[in-house]
Image: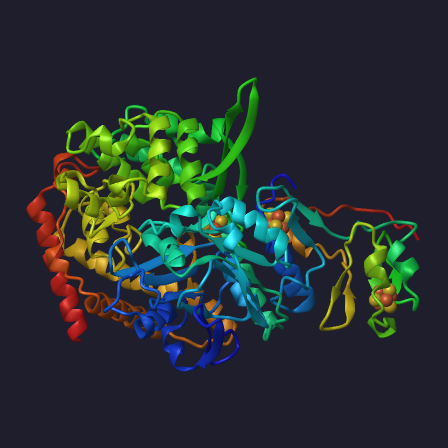
Amino acid sequence: MIYEGYIKVLYIDMTTGKIKIENRKDLCEYLGGVGVATKLLEETIRPDLDPLDENQPIVFAIGAASSIFPVITKTVAMFRSPLTGELGESYAGGRMALTMFLAGYDAMVIQGKAKKPSYLAITRNNVGFKDARAFWGMSSDEVGRVIRDREPGGGKRSIIRIGPAGENMVHYASVCVDTYRHFGRLGLGAVFGSKNLKAISIVGDRNLPIKNFKEYFKVYQDIYKKVTDTEIMAKYHDAGTPINIEPLNAAGGLPTKNLKQNVFEHGDKISGETFANQNLVRKMACTGCPVGCIHIGQFRREFDKGHEYEAVSVGYDYELIFALGSFLGIKTSDEVLQLIEPVEHLGMDAMSTGVVLGWATEAFAKKLITEEQTLVPLSFGNTANYIKAIEYIAAKKNEFYTALSEGVEKASDIYGGKDFAMAFSKNEMAGYHTGYGMILGSTVGARHSHLCNGGYSVDQSMKEFNKEKLVDAIFAEEKERCMLNSLVICLFARKVYDRTTILAALNSIGNNLTDEDLTAIGERIYKAKLRIKKALGYDQMSVRLPKRLFETPSYNGQLNEDTAYELIAMYNQKIEEFMAK
Amino acid sequence: MNKCIGCFTCMLTCSGVNRQNHSLSKSAIRVKTSGGLQGKFISVVCLACRDERACAEACPSGALEKRPGGGVMLKPEKCIGCRKCESACIVSAVSYDENENKPIICKHCGVCTRFCPHDCLRMEDVTNDL
Ligand code: SF4
Ligand code: SF4
Ligand code: SF4
């Protein structure tokens, strides 16, 4: 808690409807965010029970300087992932961090299961357990609207919620935060569903005097200036992350048609430019972020005969255009938005959904599965049928779609086609076929996300391939991001927040840390994560990489399978030494 | 305001500079959506009324003095916390500080305009109307 020497944790028991508050001094050595969340997860996770067992916890945490400096906007969620069975970690922006901060909670731990569908209404002096029976089955959009009308605190409120996919416990169901941000990856939505938890509304309206205004505001201004002066402003605000579609495609790093190709022949039709020219209607920001990278695009839909049209707006960014665009051979920006809409409303992770459907399309072409199972013929570029398939996954329509709802690893266990089931340690791939950095980074990353250590970006910046250097770079970045994520800074601002800036910010609010402290915090967190993974039975050396990665050339040319496994072994060696230290 | 991204930097800096507070609720400018996050952002802030100022007229204790050029200045020692100014302002630009028991009156200092990253807000030069 800012200005206090402890971390304030709100424990919520859905079974009994009881809460408990603990002011934990001991957690300060984890700083906040992912550090505190990892520790709380380690204390409450149940390795002996299924990820969707009601006794598993959901942990949320914000950081030591959340919301009071520019672009420190994220909240971290940790849980046992139903998709991978191991460490679940996901980030979302929106207003959630600000409202937790101004409601006065650094972290929340939610356990148990409500008897009936419920939602939580959290304020600085109360936690309401409320009836959500009538909300069950509603899209994430609809339920947001109803709660907005029911709960007070507009403007100072955050509403996080799941859609039908979360209720049905699709293993990669997402949680929507304030309409346009998500805890997307690894299935937090399913964990909500398993607790009968449809939504949480948080109102933050605390009175919180600034302790040392002069010092604080000086640092605030410096950071504000840095953010608004640097190229991140232009890069992420202008056309946004989709601007990367074009260069990645040109360089042969854009996974296309289930990675049968690394270049999309219609790439220009779904590029950032195209979206900006044809669909973009609005840009938005998470609270406290001057950048505003959220891009909203619009398409027109005929909802009835007789020229009955509506304009539909959905958020889009790079990963969505990859997963529901190039990866499925979708040829126009309008159609990409048409696929994003149901994924969004049903509440699923876009990346996993796209990758799962990519596999299903190829498996269908290879006759591993039949139309009796898929119900509609799947083929690359067929938007209408993909929309149906997305609905079938969310509803677990039949045995086949139930398998799909458990991820591409599970589906290929049953139906075959492992060589083109594009996941790293059971987490579906992100939109970068850039080289060994991406493969190694996603495989060894604590949560198997490309963002654990940014391997895809090492691929794009490393001049000459060198195994030791790559392993070292990924190891160093993984630890550094543990530290950054303990503050929960938006990763787009990671260049603004160098160590000096972080220390200046923390010192100005009375948190006197040193450079060595930051290093130690990063290492402490990484070790705790590795301990949890071990307890959950994760074995780095038994992972299997899909052969497709080595068939289709990458941004850095043809890749060799043996080299990839060698890199994983080298990394494994490294963390064994690290843990023994 | 079409360019507004809803970052709330204006509010956070207003609360910070004028009230030395991290809270959003202490800002004299409020950015809100018209109809949830899918609606447009609008800003609610003192319009700096000239000639006649409804808030000052409603004040029974003379705590709101006319500010040259438009708007009012709060004399905190005269304020009795009756909240009449709050309801008198027809654009709802006066909000109330529950901790201080005083209204939050925009000083027209321009901090919000300096920190708006997308130039949605600006200051205008005005003549003295008093
Ligand atoms: S850059 Fe985008 S995601 Fe990051 S804090 Fe700003 S608006 Fe949110
Ligand atoms: S709250 Fe204070 S300033 Fe407002 S009308 Fe009452 S006395 Fe006047
Ligand atoms: S600072 Fe500007 S862009 Fe941000 S909320 Fe205020 S008016 Fe909108």
Q: Percent x, y for residue B56?
A: 89, 59
Q: Residue at x 48, y 40 (%)?
A: A295
Vertical order, A145 against A23 (above or below): above
Q: Quadrant of residue B58?
A: bottom right
Viewer-side residue, B117 vs A565: A565
Residue at the extreme left of the image, as rendered: A562
Report whether A509 appears left or right of A189. right
Viewer-side residue, A513 vs A122: A122
Q: Quadrant of residue A497?
A: bottom left
Q: Percent x, y for residue A422?
A: 21, 42
Viewer-side residue, A184 vs A575: A184
Vertical order, A394 against A276 (above or below): below
Report whether A134 appears left or right of B49. left
Q: Residue at x 83, y 65 (%)?
A: B83
Q: Quadrant of the C terminus of chain A?
A: bottom left
Report whether A250 appears left or right of B115. left
* Residue A135, visible in the rendered structure: yes
Q: Residue at x 32, y 25 (%)?
A: A382
Q: Percent x, y for residue A469?
A: 17, 55
Viewer-side residue, A155 vs B23: A155
Q: Percent x, y for residue A258?
A: 23, 34
